[in-house]
Image (spheres, rainbow, N blue to C red):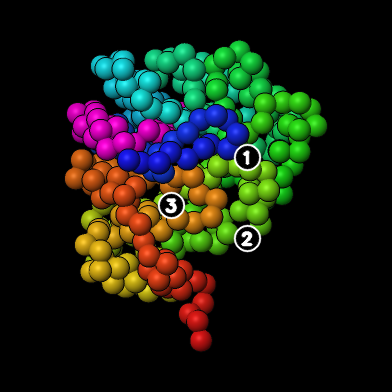
């Protein structure tokens, strides 16, 4: 049985893997997306992570495509609503003015076809709007019953601390989670001051880019491999430095466990202090199986130590 983890002090609990919705309606069509969502829930997954901006970067798209598709999936079988935690986000391109937040929330609710968003993120910090104003707008959504719990994404340690102090001082609804960029080859994006602040405030942590745009699946091992997907150009930098060292360690552990590299990379992330659930996406049910398998893989202390060493900023002397 999969043990659920608390999402801060929200009262929400989730399985230790979140399904990324960024591919829905983009590299996964509706039929494939529905199959992936069904398989995720059947495997014991509970949290679906999306955003109002997914997938505005695709020619002909305007954003909201992922939410709309998830909404159609929920409508096809309404019983799924009680089985999943829906997380979505506001403000990546629109900013976080109170009127923007209010309108965006209504639009997300409409596309998703739900009455309440379980976890609503400020997608990234907007320093042009005071934290009191943006968090005050989020607080109103909680009080109105349109949002169950609040979260923050892509905040610096200083701004995260300031946000948490702001809600405390003003008696506003308190964010319960943080979504940072974090994976085996980019540990420095979270570890250190950001993790310290998040931990001090009791925030659940849901890392995105948990598989480093697919690099940690072992799919890309040379520049010749970069053309294998539309995201290939994003992994070029990982081919240098510690990237290949991490793949070598993953390969060793794959030999020992029989698990896929993606499974091992996610299991390592799940085992890190403060992590509630890494976020990963799949464009097929076969891919998804490697992701959900991480919820059942317990790496040994030695295996974790080897991955820690391989992914350190400098090779130990």
**Secondary element at image label 1:** loop
Label number found at residue 59: none
N-terminal of the pair, mark 1 or mark 2, is 1
Q: How far is disc 3 from disc 2 in space, using C-alphas?
A: 18 Å
Q: Residues within 10 Å of mark 2 (few under 14, many from 20)?
A: few
Q: Quadrant of residue 67?
A: top left
Q: Position of residue 204 (x, y in %)?
A: 55, 42
Q: Is residue 91 magenta?
A: no
N-terminal of the pair, mark 1 or mark 3, is 1
Asked if residue 54 can be seen in this view, the reply is no
Residue farthest toward the bottom in the current orientation of the protein: 317
Q: What residue is shown at x 63% (from left), y 43% (from top)?
A: 202
Q: Is 120 drawn above or below residue 299 in the view shown?
A: above
User: Left or right of 236: which side holds 126?
Assistant: right
Q: Which residues are magenta?
A: 29-52
Closer to the observer: label 1 or label 2? 2
**Secondary element at image label 3:** helix
Q: How far is disc 1 from disc 3 in space, using C-alphas?
A: 26 Å
Q: Which residue is mark 2?
A: 192
N-terminal of the pair, mark 3 or mark 2, is 2
Asked if residue 184 can be seen in this view, the reply is yes
Q: What residue is shown at x 36% (from left), y 61% (from top)?
A: 299
The N terminus - image quarter: top left
Closer to the observer: label 1 or label 3? 3
Q: Position of residue 218 (x, y in %)?
A: 28, 62
Which is more toward the observer, 42 or 62?
42
Residue farthest toward the right in the current orientation of the protein: 169
**Secondary element at image label 2:** loop
Label number found at residue 125: 1
Q: Which residue is mark 3?
A: 270
């Amino acid at each position: 049985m999969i043990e659920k983890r608390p999402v801060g002090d929200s009262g929400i609990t989730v399985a230790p893997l979140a399904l990324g919705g960024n591919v829905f309606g983009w590299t996964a069509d509706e039929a494939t997306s529905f199959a992936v969502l069904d398989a995720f829930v059947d495997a014991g997954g509970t949290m679906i992570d999306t955003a109002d901006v997914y997938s505005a970067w695709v020619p002909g798209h305007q954003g909201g495509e992922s939410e709309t598709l998830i909404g159609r999936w929920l409508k096809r079988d309404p019983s799924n609503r009680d089985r999943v935690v829906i997380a979505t986000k506001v403000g990546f391109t629109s900013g976080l003015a109170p009127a923007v937040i209010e309108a965006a929330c209504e639009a997300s609710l409409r596309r998703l076809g739900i009455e309440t968003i379980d976890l609503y993120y400020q997608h990234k910090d907007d320093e042009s709007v005071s934290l009191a104003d943006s968090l005050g707008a989020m607080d109103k959504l909680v009080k109105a019953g349109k949002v169950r719990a609040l979260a923050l994404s892509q905040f610096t340690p200083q701004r995260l601390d300031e946000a948490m102090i702001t809600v405390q001082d003003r008696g506003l609804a308190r964010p319960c989670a943080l979504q940072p960029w974090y994976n085996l080859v980019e540990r420095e994006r979270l570890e250190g001051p950001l993790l310290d602040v998040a931990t001090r405030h009791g925030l659940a942590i849901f890392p995105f880019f948990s598989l480093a745009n697919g690099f940690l699946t072992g799919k890309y091992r040379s520049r010749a491999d970069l053309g294998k997907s539309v995201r290939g150009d994003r992994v070029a930098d990982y081919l240098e430095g510690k990237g290949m060292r991490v793949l070598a360690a993953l390969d060793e552990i794959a030999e020992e466990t029989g698990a896929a590299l993606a499974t091992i990379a996610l299991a390592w992330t799940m085992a890190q202090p403060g992590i509630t659930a890494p976020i990963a996406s799949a464009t097929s049910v076969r891919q998804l199986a490697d992701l959900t398998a991480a919820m059942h893989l317990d790496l040994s202390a030695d295996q974790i130590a080897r991955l820690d060493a391989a992914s350190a900023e400098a090779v130990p002397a």
